[in-house]
Image: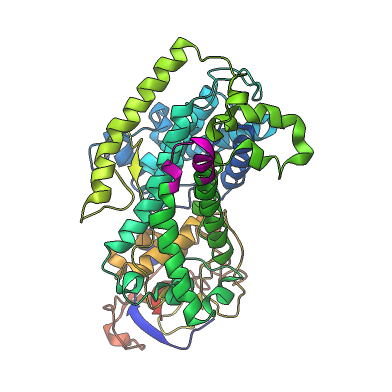
């Protein structure tokens, strides 16, 4: 469909026969979701992990071969990836599929058994890092290291080899529980501070950020319009609530569980964050970011509170109590828990020291006037700094791709699965599903010139080639059903500068090139909608 106003920003035309050896980054997926040792976290997280593992599988990653065999990234960080084991570079795609299937089967096993051990969680961490290391912009989202870090913490909650469900004799790794609370604190505080330092007046001066947030977010859902059309005073209230949740409420997560006051602070801190994430989930499709952020908040809730919601499953409550009572400070139940082995104590102490050491640059970044968002300061990216939506756009822009057999048209538009395009198409609910191609198109539109998103040129090439894997990432192929022939037809090619207004081509100034298959796209362009 066409929007009312259309601004031609770029008109990119390629001769189809020149694209034989170009590669495009297809839509790799995220398939490895973190699980926690506690049964409630294991079952919720592994289910979430399984859902996201079934996203559209990857085909090719940008400059994968060049990056992989350098064994380090642009910041000289080691590339942690199972693809090192691939000796034949021509078989990278099957290896990527294999990593996805490995993560899928492992997470499904955890979901079925309701338990996990260190090797299983380590395998999931390696699968996630394998794709992060070579994924380029397709794995450049802030929630990718967030997922990997939470999986890293989960390693120290799980038993070494046992796959038995939680029981009263299980040790309680309290240092890991507090590491996860610290992890959640950094996520929320980073999001709040980046808004404070972004110099966007809509957050702290006019308090009008929510006036624009819903209509400019990447992928709206069916309820987004109802949030958007709320009264102005309600949007001001939303901004105030956002500041409270991200800048004040996170401190409740760090209050020691001493007495009733400490327990109440932990409960309130966890419930505030869970409720906030559920509201965000209902207002838009923000991938699995909000689901992932809600999972560690569950660790702030104790057994006495959770029993109210899991009464039909009382037989599991006793096993859960040993862990969650440590969180709430219930000394009666703690007395039934055996003392951890000396080896486990040593591991916990070393883990705590590691968290403390790696958190120093993260804290310095949070306190800095030049705060970085979604950055890592250690080579293995174990402890990171986070943030989201520091700046909210006031106007939505969309890139619309269309192609034609003739430079004068007619032009046929490509529709994406969830990206805004046809104004008559109802938004879909896809969270926690993540359409990376659609997100990348939104990022490209926000980045200004498409030259800042070089992957898009390869994408256009593949569309002209009618590559089946790439077309599978879209909602439609406008050339489906169009008859083609290999006759001696001649087509023309003209490269027109971006921003040009001329629609017609002077045949005298056009180079006519043979080998044009009629009934197939020969020209492709990108229009910017506002």
Please say if 52 is above or below 446.
above
Towards the viewer: 127 or 348 = 348
Instruction: Tell me the residue at 47%/81% (across/down).
Output: 232
Main secondary-structure element of the magenta-colored stretch: helix
**Is any atom of residue 357 visible in this view?**
yes
Magenta span: 252-264
Instruction: Tell me the residue at 27%/43% (across/down).
Output: 363
Residue 225, percent from left and from top: 56, 76
Left or right for 415, reference 442: right
| Quarter of the image with the N terminus in it | bottom right
Towards the viewer: 465 or 279 = 279
Residue 345, percent from left and from top: 43, 16
**Is any atom of residue 29 visible in this view?**
no
Find out whether residue 261 is within the magenta segment.
Answer: yes
Left or right for 5, reference 31: left
Towards the viewer: 229 or 126 = 229
Residue 175, percent from left and from top: 43, 28
Please say if 172 is above or below 212.
above
Furthest toward the top, the residue is 342
């Amino acid at each position: 469909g066409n929007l009312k106003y259309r601004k031609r920003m770029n008109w990119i035309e390629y001769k189809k026969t020149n694209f034989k050896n170009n590669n495009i980054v297809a839509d790799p997926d995220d398939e490895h979701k973190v699980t926690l040792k506690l049964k409630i976290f294991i079952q919720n997280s592994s289910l979430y992990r399984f859902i996201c593992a079934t996203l559209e599988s990857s085909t090719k990653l940008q400059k994968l071969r060049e990056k992989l065999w350098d064994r380090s990234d642009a910041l000289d960080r080691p590339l942690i990836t199972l693809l090192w084991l691939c000796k034949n570079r021509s078989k990278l795609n099957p290896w990527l599929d294999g990593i996805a299937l490995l993560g899928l089967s492992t997470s499904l096993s955890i979901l079925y058994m309701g338990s996990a051990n260190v090797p299983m969680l380590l395998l999931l961490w390696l699968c996630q890092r394998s794709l992060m290391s070579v994924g380029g912009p397709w794995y450049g989202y802030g929630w990718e290291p967030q997922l990997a870090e939470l999986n890293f913490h989960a390693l120290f909650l799980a038993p070494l080899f046992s796959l038995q469900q939680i029981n009263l004799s299980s040790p309680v790794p309290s240092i890991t529980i507090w590491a996860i609370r610290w992890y959640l604190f950094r996520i929320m505080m980073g999001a709040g501070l980046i808004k404070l330092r972004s110099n966007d007046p809509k957050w702290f001066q006019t308090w009008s950020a929510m006036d624009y947030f819903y209509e400019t977010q990447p992928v709206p859902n069916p309820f987004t319009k109802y949030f958007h059309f709320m009264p102005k005073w309600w949007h001001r209230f939303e901004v105030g609530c956002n500041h409270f949740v991200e800048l004040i409420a996170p401190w409740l997560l760090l209050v020691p569980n001493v007495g009733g006051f400490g327990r109440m602070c932990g409960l309130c801190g966890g419930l505030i964050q869970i409720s906030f994430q559920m509201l965000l989930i209902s207002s838009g499709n923000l991938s699995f970011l909000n689901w992932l952020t809600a999972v560690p908040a569950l660790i702030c809730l104790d057994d006495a509170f959770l029993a109210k919601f899991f009464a039909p499953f009382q037989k599991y409550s006793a096993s859960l109590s040993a862990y969650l009572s440590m969180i709430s400070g219930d000394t009666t139940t703690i007395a039934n828990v055996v003392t951890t082995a000396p080896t486990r104590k040593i591991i916990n102490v070393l883990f705590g020291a590691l968290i403390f050491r790696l958190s120093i640059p993260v804290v310095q970044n949070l306190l800095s006037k030049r705060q970085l968002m979604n950055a890592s300061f250690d080579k293995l990216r174990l402890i990171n700094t986070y943030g989201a939506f520091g700046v909210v756009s006031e106007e939505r822009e969309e890139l619309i791709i269309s192609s034609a057999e003739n430079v004068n048209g007619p032009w046929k538009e490509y529709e994406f699965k969830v990206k805004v395009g046809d104004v008559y198409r109802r938004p879909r609910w896809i969270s926690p599903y993540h359409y990376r191609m659609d997100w990348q198109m939104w990022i490209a539109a926000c980045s200004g010139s498409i030259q800042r998103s070089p992957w898009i040129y390869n994408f256009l090439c593949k569309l002209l080639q009618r590559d089946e894997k790439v077309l599978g990432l879209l909602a439609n192929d406008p050339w489906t059903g169009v008859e083609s022939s290999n006759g001696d037809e001649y087509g023309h090619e003209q490269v027109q500068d971006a921003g040009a207004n001329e629609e017609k081509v002077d045949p005298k100034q056009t180079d006519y090139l043979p080998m044009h298959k009629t009934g197939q796209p020969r020209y492709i362009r990108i229009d910017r909608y506002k």
